[in-house]
Amino acid sequence: MFRSVLVANRGEIAQRILKALQELGIRSVAVFSEADRDSPHLEWADDAICIGGSRSGESYLNMDAVIQAALLSDCQAVHPGFGFLAENALFAAMCGQAKLTFIGPSPAAIRDMGVKASARETMRAVGLEPIPGSKGIVRTLAAAREVAASMGYPVLLKASAGGGGRGMRVAEDEAGLSTAFSQARMESEKAFGNADLYLEKFIRGGRHIEFQILADVYGNAVHLGERECSVQRNHQKLVEESPSPVVSAKQRAEVGARVAAAVAKIGYTNAGTVEFLRDTDGTLYFMEMNTRLQVEHPVTEMVTGFDIVKEQIAIAANRKLSISQDNVKMTGHAIEVRINAEDPAENFRPTPGEIRVFAPPAEGDGVRVDTHVRPGTVVPPFYDSMIAKLICRGPDRASTIEKTVEALHDFRIEGVKSTIPIHLEILASEEFRSGAYDTRLVASLLEKNGVD
């Protein structure tokens, strides 16, 4: 096992990893920006190093600074968490060149899965059927028109080099394809430095289903069941649950086995998430693979009992998986809500500032709060606005919804606006409670509230 690990992240996820390292008896080093100098998560680290200015490019995205911090503090490995450098193949390669273990997949795997168009074909070859669409990049409007005409409208243009909803446009017909193509290319170039697009059939009423996987360097791979991530705003997840209310035990076993076999065939290692779009007929189409720890990993931990972060660390240290598929059992139901410093009534405008009151519900009895925040913590304007994750588990879905609602009512945050009101509205909606919702749920609720 490692002697010392640097955590190349901030906030809630940095604290989550630091806690796991502490429990494993591994010395930890945190890095921080000038804006995070007083962040409470630093208290969980054995050592902390400032790596630059407040903006991400000056600190958390500064690969040379992160690696120098790891070397100067005598670390053997780097855990990137999620976001920032977590899916940066160059950074993973630079870690290797510096003789640091990157706690994640290989640079080649990050690169191959990061190019979405080629990832579709890679996964098709190992048994996961993607959403009907182009075979690779559509480089011209004429090519996009040809593919769209062959499959029928509506179609979805997507950035090949990125995700998170950027570089995505829906075209309802041929007349709208020209505008959608130029807008998607422009946004993709701006966001990812790569204007390449691919095209898929747009599935209305689809649901976002993802399978958590773990794979070691010895060819062993397991899946830990699925998460339902269809409660989204602009392709950004707000609420996740496990198991999905629309995936049967039979489909879970069949698709999960194919997923585990697929990642083993491509030689993938460490944690990852294979994402699907569920059509209205129940078919699960491969969308993409995220080569990192997911924000929503706690719902899987709550229903399986496995610590995914500790497994990541052990895999990176060349340990065999401690988990076999036979001992993966999903028990009960779990729901996670992401609490951001944003104002849902103002189109989710970020609300940075000092959190004067922060009183989360008591943990225990199926309630978990992942956060780095306490009263007096300042939410800086430079980064993602998530300040906490509330995860609740119960014996069944109905009781878990009620437990989550109760915990949200008990959650007090003052000084900044938060997304708690929209979470309560989502959980109270007939669509969510029945389980008969899709990716359009949040948009419909916001429309009722007069929010664009």
Image (spheres, rainbow, N blue to C red):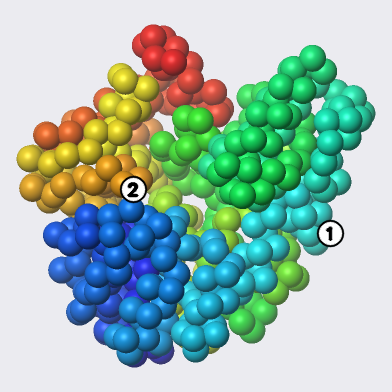
Secondary structure at badge 2 equals loop
In this rendering, does residue 385 appear at all? yes
Graded by Cα atoms within 10 Å as few (under 14), some (14 to 19) or many (20 or more), the crowding at tag 2 reads: some
**Residue 28 occupies which quadrant of the picture?**
bottom left
Q: Which residue is mark 2?
A: 383
- Depth check: 221 or 375 in front? 375
The spot of residue 323 in percent (x, y) is: 52, 74
In the depicted structure, whether residue 240 falls above or below residue 422: below
Residue at 37% x, 22% y is 347
| Position of the N terminus by quadrant | bottom left
In the depicted structure, whether residue 29 falls above or below residue 214: below
In this rendering, does residue 319 appear at all? no
Residue at 28% x, 27% y is 343
In the depicted structure, whether residue 79 falls above or below residue 357: below
Select label 2 or label 1 by which is in front: 2
The spot of residue 439 in percent (x, y) is: 55, 29
Secondary structure at badge 1 equals helix
Q: Amino acid at mark 1?
A: Ala
The spot of residue 115 in percent (x, y) is: 69, 55
Q: Earlier in the sequence, mark 2 or mark 1?
A: 1
Q: CA distance from mark 2 to mark 1?
A: 38 Å
Q: Which residue is mark 1?
A: 125
Residue at 32% x, 24% y is 344
Graded by Cα atoms within 10 Å as few (under 14), some (14 to 19) or many (20 or more), the crowding at tag 1 reads: few
